[in-house]
Amino acid sequence: MAQKPLGGQTETLSYSEKHVYGSSSDDFSDKQRTNAVAENIDVIEPPADLERAVAGKLSPWTLMVVIMELCERLAYYGASLMFSIYLQKILGRSKPEAVALNRVNQFMSYATTILGAIIADQWLGKFKTILIFAILYLIGLVLLTVSSADFSVAGGFGLPGFCIAVFAFIGFGTGGIKSNVSAFMAEQIPSGYKPTKTPGVYEDSKLTVERGFRYFYWSINVGAFVGQMVCPQVAKNKSYALAFMIPAVVFFAGIVVFVAGSKRYVKKKPQGTVVLKVWKCMRYARKHKREGQKHWLDGSLGAADQPWNDEFVIGLQRSLRACKVFLFYPLYWALYNNMSDNFINQGMTMRRPDWLSVDQLNVVNSLVLIIAIPLFDKFVFPLLRRLGFRMGPIARITTGFVIVVLGFVYVTILQKMIYTKGPYMDFTGPDVPEGATNDISVWLQIVPYAAVAISEIFSSVTGLEFAFSQAPAELKSVLTALYLFTNCGGALIGLILAIWGGDPQVMYVFAAETIVLGILTVVFYFCFRHYDDMIAEQEQFGNQ
């Protein structure tokens, strides 16, 4: 056992289960380097001759998990993007009702993440859990397709079928998948440093995991882009039943790809009652306080005959710090979720070409991410590291919050501009026809869609990575689920604000959300900026 200080406390690092090629205190000889590269051997501790760390390539079976996520996100965004207009035009719901139902969908999709994490960590493992929830999800997509057919809508099954499909099957399915699939992808990446053919240059698993999460998020947006481009046009020109069928077919293909890689995956066994283990560890620490301890959980360090070791305690401490960070995410998601309803409603009041379905402007968000994520991965972040300036997770999250706040300042001003243009001003007059638009171009919405996309690279991607890197092995799904659960909080905020989702109140909703997140961003940075130094020290000693 080796002990290193971290953020004013003693952290215990264990290497008992880690294979080290040679001695980390000696430089690699040319022969050792050639053998290590050929045999795909990882060095756990930072090598003495380390000059530069780089991200490694993702394995084919890691990419199979990414492909499955791409198909799932195509299904989710391809279908859910159409909900707002479908509910209003086909099922006869009002704007506030459509916004509320859409936010309930978002709430269910993230409220069930913790259930998926507990099932995976305690009983089934991540692979089986993902597969079972994927089947539930697929059943929901099929039911949604049937309920949107003309005979179902005419027979009064349209709205009940929608609610059953979305809230019972799709909501549970996507939540159970979300809490496990990103962590399962990251678990396919071996831990440690792998020597390259260049002396002094090593592949660092931490950077490879960062890359994995960026491309995982990239795949989400490729799926979203395709779904958002294709499905609304099919609904506009053919039928909603056919448009909802496309996500079902694509997701079935994604499940087939996922199962095909089963024999090559790293499948960590479930750890049993990890929640109970956490509770016992916390209770033990409370009963065994020590004089001068730096963290209230330090009382559980060195405990004999207990189901945890010191490494678990340190990981639990980091997990609790991460949860404090996650408390600031719900309002970020509340702003983000406007893209799926209030942005669409805003676009429906603006002048646009006949061929454009306003919900399709969401493709701007996905397209920006598809282009920007590889650019940031290949050029921006490596350049910053070469210059000796590596943005820690808190700095990246803060940057994302700032960008989305600026984007919503623009959204609020744009909404005001819509209301100052004729002929219908704020759409509250007595002679406002259905589908009325004011004389202002819908293309002005491109800016906020793009701003939200750039913010996601810094805030959303980093949140997933942060949850995975700070949790001990037994808690990775649970901590990921807790991070995703913050989106549930954002959906709940949006559900409450949906009362004011109509014109002209929505402008004040935009303004209020912007001001509150702006204030919270300042508070967030000054509360947690010291975490970046603590995490840098943690990574220096190779402790994931």
Image (cartoon, rainbow, N blue to C red):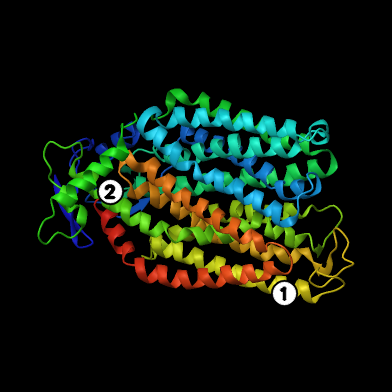
Position of 152 compared to 75: left or right? right
Instruction: Give the amino acid type for the residue marked by disc 2 in the picture.
Output: Leu
Residue in front for this viewpoint, 533 or 204: 533
What secondary structure is marked by label 1? helix
Label at residue 416: 1
Determine the CA span between mark 2 and mark 1: 47 Å
Against 504, residue 152 (above or below) is above
Q: Residue at x 76, y 54 (%)?
A: 94
The percent position of residue 18, horizontal first and vertical second, equals 23, 37
Which quadrant of the figure has residue 148? top right
Q: Residue at x 23, y 42 (%)?
A: 280
The percent position of residue 543, horizontal first and vertical second, equals 26, 48
Label at residue 316: 2
Q: Answer yes or no: is residue 348 visible.
A: yes
Label at residue 149: none
Instruction: Give the amino acid type for the residue marked by disc 1 in the picture.
Output: Lys
Quadrant for the N terminus, please.
top left
The percent position of residue 482, horizontal first and vertical second, equals 42, 48
